[in-house]
Amino acid sequence: MAAATVATLAAVGGRLYATRPGPEPPVLAAHPSQVVGVTYLHTEEKPGLDGGFAFAVELVARSGPPVTVERIDQPYAGLSLASIPRAPFGTREIVITMKVTDCGKVPRNVGLPFLDVTLRNTRAMEAHSFILGERYARDLSHALQVACGNEFATSPKR
């Protein structure tokens, strides 16, 4: 009888062990563009930019693991961009400086300007375009008008 009890307990224990729930699957972090918000803050006064202008932008990771900004750029061929701090950096308030390199290649009025941002977190690295809104569009158009005023006045409308 003792042998039968030991055998029964071993069978029940083996069955319980075999049917126990497995470990929880790891929770994947969201893609970085799903958790990062980019907000245009204001123009920056930066004396000595020699035809350049600057904007303050805030990049915030709303949840999940830390997000790194690997690269930041803009789409216009006649405009160069640099950020302070330089990429790569964690999400934070940054200053973007732009300088017109060719007035013939920048638009007179910018409708929906965006920033191209390459983001990385523990899940992925991805490039995403962020539209910064009407106020940024207005300020960027004004800065381009100031930088290229005479050339805009003598060139045909684009």
Image (cartoon, rainbow, N blue to C red):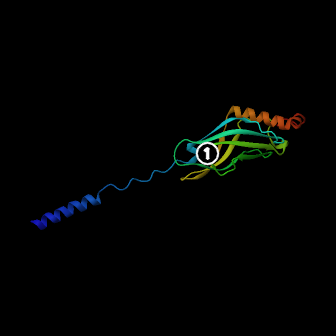
**Closer-to-camera residue (93/5):** 93
- Which sits in the foreground, 103 or 87? 87
Left or right: residue 2 versus residue 157 is left
Residue 156 vertical placement versus 121 (above, below): above
Please identify the residue farthest to the right as the structure is shown.
Answer: 154
Q: In which quarter of the image is residue 74?
A: top right
Residue density around tag 1, few if under 14, some if 14–19, many if 20 or more, within 10 Å: some
The residue lying at 18 percent from left, 62 percent from top is: 9
Q: Residue furthest front?
A: 47
Residue placed furthest toward the left: 1
Q: Quick check: 2 above or below 42?
A: below
Q: Mark 1 highlights which residue?
A: 91
Please indicate whether residue 8 sits to the left or right of residue 50 in the image.
Answer: left
User: In this view, which residue lies farthest toward the bottom?
Assistant: 3
- What is the secondary structure assignment of the residue under circle 1? loop
Q: Residue at x 83, y 35 (%)?
A: 146
- Residue occupying image coordinates x 90% and y 35%: 154
At label 1, the amino acid type is Thr
The percent coordinates of residue 89 (x first, y second) are 64, 50
Residue 82 placement (x, y as % from top left): 74, 47
Q: Which of 90 and 117 lies nearest the eye of the viewer?
A: 90
Q: Can residue 65 be seen?
A: yes
Which quarter shows the C terminus?
top right
Horizontally, residue 10 falls left or right of residue 119, namely left
- Is 27 in front, or is 93? 93
Q: Where is residue 50 in the image (x, y as percent from the top left)?
A: 84, 42
Examine the rendering and report whether any part of residue 109 can be seen.
no
